[in-house]
Image: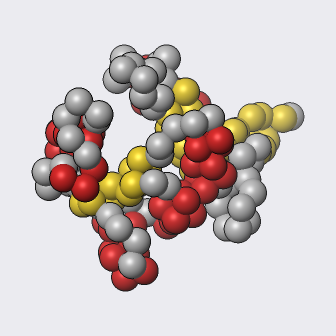
């Protein structure tokens, strides 16, 4: 958390993969929720401890957004795919690309497009209390 912001990752991937990606990026202190993979008698066993919501995903991002909002945060959902839809419906602001961007536009959900993380960082800076508001943020 910096400047009053909480950053967390909600992913449909497995925990070992997310942990490694965050570690490589120097972000291993960032909180995350994901699906789990464990081995039992030589078999891979998938676990979905964060399922819920509509039941279509292993990690309900709508529920993750609701948790953040209950903690008093304004939530910006950043995503690009099918599993981000429930989160996009529940979030205060949506920043999207790919399939999620088109789905939001088609469903009348206010959305800001992004292509890369540099543009996303510019949008977040402009959207912060000292830099402007999400509605006036530059295109990323």
**Is 69 drawn above or below residue 60 in the view shown?**
above
List x then y, in percent, for residue 102: 33, 75
Q: Name the residue located 75 percent from the left edge and 57 percent from the top edge.
A: 52
Which residue of the protein is positioned furthest toward the left in this rendering? Answer: 138
List x then y, in percent, for residue 5: 42, 28
> Left or right of 8: which side holds 125?
left
Front one among 84 and 131: 131
List x then y, in percent, for residue 103: 40, 75
**Is 67 drawn above or below residue 63 in the view shown?**
above
> Left or right of 27: which side holds 121?
left
Q: Name the residue located 39 percent from the left edge and 78 percent from the top edge.
A: 108
List x then y, in percent, for residue 38: 74, 35
Q: Name the residue located 33 percent from the left edge and 76 percent from the top edge.
A: 105
User: Does residue 78 appear anywhere in the picture?
Assistant: yes
Residue 23 sits in which quadrant? top left
> Left or right of 13: which side holds 75?
left
Count all numbered tags in the image, as a single digit.
0
> Left or right of 42: which side holds 96?
left
**Is 86 drawn above or below residue 4 in the view shown?**
below
Q: Name the residue located 27 percent from the left edge and 60 percent from the top edge.
A: 112
Quadrant of the rendering where the N terminus is positioned: top left
Front one among 121 and 134: 134
Front one among 78 and 18: 78
**Is 81 drawn above or below residue 116 in the view shown?**
below
Which residue of the protein is positioned furthest toward the bottom in this rendering? Answer: 106
User: Does residue 83 appear anywhere in the picture?
Assistant: no
């Amino acid at each position: 958390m910096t400047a009053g912001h909480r950053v967390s990752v909600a992913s449909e991937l497995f925990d070992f993969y997310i942990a490694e990606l965050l570690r490589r990026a120097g972000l291993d202190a960032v909180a995350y929720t994901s699906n789990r993979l464990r081995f039992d008698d030589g078999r891979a066993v998938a676990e979905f401890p964060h399922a819920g919501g509509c039941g279509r995903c292993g990690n309900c991002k709508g529920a993750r957004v609701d948790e953040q909002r209950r903690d008093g945060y304004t939530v910006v959902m950043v995503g690009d795919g099918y599993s981000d839809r429930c989160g996009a419906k529940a979030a205060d602001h949506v920043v999207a690309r790919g399939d999620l961007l088109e789905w939001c536009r088609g469903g009348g959900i206010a959305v800001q497009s992004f292509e890369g993380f540099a543009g996303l960082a510019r949008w977040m800076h402009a959207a912060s209390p000292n830099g402007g508001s999400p509605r006036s943020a530059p295109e990323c």
